């Protein structure tokens, strides 16, 4: 896992540690010292911690004008023990929402497990963005992660599954990815929006 880096090809457009509005503004990274772990496995030092002991992230892009954020995740998403969604909502999403960000793409191909609990924070997040026709979308979930999310009833608040599990997002520029995701959601009958 230590060699899985956050996606870096958009760094010419956005760097969270250099964004005054980012919850990760001013973070320093040591490229040679691996300290962060998911269980007993070291992860690349470029991943950002946000409160969860098993889930890490990298904000790949925030566009304040178009009001979207693209976030890549790695690790185990555990709402049962760690209440990871609470940390995600309080430490990251609420900060971005102050700047009217209301569209969220969470890239989840490196989320190895999901353990659900209740869906209160997802509902709160949904309530925060629905007035502005915002949305949240999880891309490229593993089947077992998608099944657990569906069993936790998160699909009432977030878009995932179907074509959203097969998005080749690395070929896109950030705005193209948002357009692609919106097109997929518009064409899918099971999606929320």
Image (tube, rainbow, N blue to C red):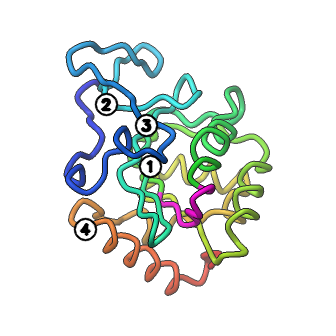
Q: Position of residue 36 (x, y in %)?
A: 40, 18
Tell me if residue 47 is in the magenta stretch.
no
Query: Where in the figure is residue 134, as x and y percent of width and height?
Result: 61, 72
The reply to whether the C-beta atoms of the residues labelled 3 and 2 are less than 8 Å apart is: no
Q: Residue at x 45, y 22 (%)?
A: 38
Q: Decide: marks 1, 2 in contact (CB < 8 A)?
A: no
Image marks 1 and 3: residues in contact by CB distance under 8 Å: no
Report the Cα–Cα distance between label 3 and label 4: 25 Å
Disc 2 residue crowd, few under 14, some 14–19, many 20+, Cα 10 Å: many
Q: Which of the two discs, 3 and 2, labels the residue nearer the N terminus?
A: 3
Q: Which mark is residue 157?
A: none
Name which residue lies at 36% across and 13% down.
Answer: 35
Q: Is residue 99 magenta?
A: yes
Q: Are marks 3 and 4 in contact (CB under 8 Å)?
A: no
Residue holding disc 2: 46
Sequence-wise, the earlier of marks 4 and 2 is 2
Residue identified by numbered label 4? 172
Mark-to-mark CA distance, 1 and 3: 23 Å
Q: Earlier in the sequence, mark 1 or mark 3?
A: 3
**Element assignment for label 1:** strand
Please state if 47 lies on the left or on the right of 124 as rendered: left
């Amino acid at each position: 896992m230590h060699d899985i880096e956050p996606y870096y090809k958009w760094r010419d457009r956005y760097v969270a540690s250099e964004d005054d509005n980012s919850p990760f503004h001013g973070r320093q990274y040591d490229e040679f010292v691996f300290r962060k772990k998911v269980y007993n496995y070291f992860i690349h030092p470029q991943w950002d911690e946000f409160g969860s002991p098993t889930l890490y992230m990298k904000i790949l892009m925030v566009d304040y004008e178009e009001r979207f954020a693209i976030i890549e995740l790695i690790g185990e998403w555990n709402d049962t023990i760690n209440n990871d969604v609470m940390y995600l909502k309080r430490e990251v999403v609420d900060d971005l929402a102050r700047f009217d960000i209301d569209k969220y793409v969470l890239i989840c191909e490196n989320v190895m497990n999901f353990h659900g609990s209740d869906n209160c924070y997802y509902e709160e997040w949904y309530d925060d963005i629905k007035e502005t026709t915002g949305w949240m979308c999880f891309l490229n979930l593993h089947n077992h992660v998608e099944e657990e999310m569906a069993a936790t009833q998160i699909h009432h608040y977030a878009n995932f599954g179907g074509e959203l599990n097969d998005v080749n997002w690395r070929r896109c520029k950030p705005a193209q990815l948002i357009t692609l995701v919106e097109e997929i959601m518009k064409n899918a009958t099971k999606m929320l929006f």
